[in-house]
Image (cartoon, coloured by chain):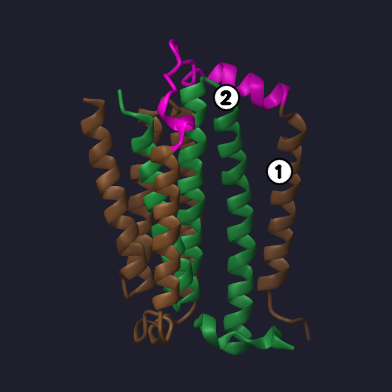
Amino acid sequence: MDQGFFLLFATVSVITAVMVVLAPNPVHSALALMACFLQISAIFVLLEAPLLAVIQIFVYVGAIMVLFLFVIMMIDVREAVLQRFLPGRNLPALVLLVLLGVEMLVLVRWSDRFSVMEAAATPTGGDVRLLSITLFAHYLLPFEAASVILLAALVGAIVLARKEPG
Amino acid sequence: MVPLWWYIVLGVVLFVIGAAGVLLRRNILVVLMSLELLLNSVNINFIVFGHTYDDFRGQIFAIFVIAITAAEVAVALGILVALVRNKSTLKVDDVTMMKG
């Protein structure tokens, strides 16, 4: 049951991820990326992390992708449709990517770190109360640092995107 | 019960697809979107290992990754708007102003 759902979500997410890279129009890429994020949040639900699934939908699909679509709306993307990939030979990059993927897969399959592990007997990952206690008690300082970073990013984005004065 | 390595293989595949987008595409917007895909595949790994070891730190790290990603996207899109206003191009190989 779980495996069937996982295979469904994983297949759709990989297909939409390929569509992100291959679509000629950036708007189609953004929509495919949205679908991919929805599948990944479904996978988070399978992993008993419902809070992360909701955050994924709110932040990625609700905020980041809407930001992307607004920027696409503001600027003219028609000339970018003509040439999708970088000019010249892409062979070294492709070889590098294949090597990267094969390396990671080989490490996963043949390393004893991943094969011997058993799942925890009573997973408590879905317990939002325990998660938030951990977050706000042990990780309070990183949390505050993250909020300062978000504030700095907000100010920086406004300063970068506004017109030059005068 | 889904085996652990299925999730890891999914993370690897999404990472390679995102890296392909970053390395091969010419449009800056699609490069940024592929970057999002990379960060999301890392998030899958965080949550899978947190789930396997029954440890909250995976989920907490994933929350921080999402927060930093939001900041990164805001700044990157601000830079993109400024770039389009000043240079009116969206191609990564046309942006060579800092060559020196």
Look at the numbered discs 2 and 1 and tell me whether their residues touch, using CB distance below 8 Å: no
Check residue A129 for magenta coloring.
yes
Dot 1: element: helix
The residue shown at (59%, 75%) is B81
Q: Nearer the viewer, residue A20 or A88?
A: A88
Q: Which mark is residue B26?
A: none
Crowding around mark 1 (Cα neighbors within 10 Å: few <14, some 14 to 19, many 20+) is some
Q: Which mark is residue A146?
A: 1
Camera sees residue A72 = no
The residue shown at (65%, 63%) is B75
Distance between the alpha carbons at the discs numbered 2 and 1: 18 Å
Q: Are marks 2 and 1 on the same chain?
A: no
Q: Give the magenta part as a residue range.
A: A111-138
Horizontal arrangement in the rendering, residue A12 relative to residue A122 (left or right)? left
Tell me the mark number nearer the camera, choosing from 2 and 1.
Answer: 2
The colour applied to the residues of chain B in this rendering is green
Q: Quadrant of residue B15?
A: bottom left
Q: Which mark is residue B56?
A: 2
Chain shown brown: that is A
